[in-house]
Amino acid sequence: MPADDACQLCREAGGETLWQDERCRLVLVADADYPGFCRVVWKRHVAEMTDLDAAERRHLMSVVFAAESALRAAARPHKVNLASLGNVVPHLHWHVIPRWRDDRHFPNPIWGAAVREGARRPAVEGAILHAAFLRSLAEEQGGK
């Protein structure tokens, strides 16, 4: 079976698509514990950053940094975690995760056991995050 047939991120968006270009997409993950949680997914099926050429890596990271900036503006977290693991889904993608000192897992990674109930926060509207992302991307890419 070709990799793209077996790969969840080749078959599915991975969340609500907020933005995309010919190389990658920004998706909003439905996670009530971490409102505004996003993924930046490389469209072509590759597993590692070094599978990309230098220009592609710069482009991907400019999108990741713009997503982080937009998340900070829209959700006002105490911290943002950036992670590119791919252990379960070996398709290049970055997690952009808002963190609060009173969230379910703080200070541990969100994939471990919860350490508390966690404070409830309002959802981050996709439209608000999208608008903040477009402003941040323009800044990140030098006004292009």
Image (tube, grey):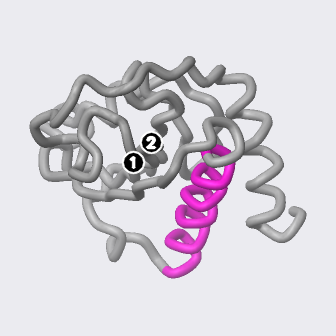
- Name above or below for residue 39 compared with residue 65: above
What distance separates the C-alpha of mark 1 from that of mark 2? 5 Å
Where residue 13 sits, quadrant-wise, is top left
**Numbered label attached to residue 39:** 2
Image coordinates for residue 9, horizontal then vertical, percent: 32, 35
Q: Is residue 44 magenta?
A: no
> Between residues 7 and 117, which one lies in front from this camera angle?
117
Q: Which residues are magenta?
A: 54-71
Asked if residue 55 is among those painted magenta in the image, a careful observer would answer yes
Sequence-wise first label, 1 or 2: 2
Q: Is residue 91 left or right of residue 37?
A: left
**Residue at image mark 1:** 95
Where does residue 24 sit, x and y in percent of width and height? 54, 48
Q: Are marks 1 and 2 in contact (CB under 8 Å)?
A: yes
- Indicate the secondary structure of the residue bearing disc 1: strand
| 56 versus 97 height, above or below | below
Disc 2 crowd, CA 10 A, few/some/many (<14, 14-19, 20+): many
Looking at the image, residue 57 sits to the left or right of residue 33; the answer is right
Dominant secondary-structure state across the stretch colored magenta: helix
Identify the residue at horizontal 82%, vertical 63% (top origin).
139
Residue found farthest to the right: 143
Under mark 2, the amino acid is Arg
Where residue 130 sits in the image (x, y, percent)? 71, 33
Residue for point 35% across, 35% down:
103
**Picture residue at 62% right of the left edge, 42% below the top:** 76
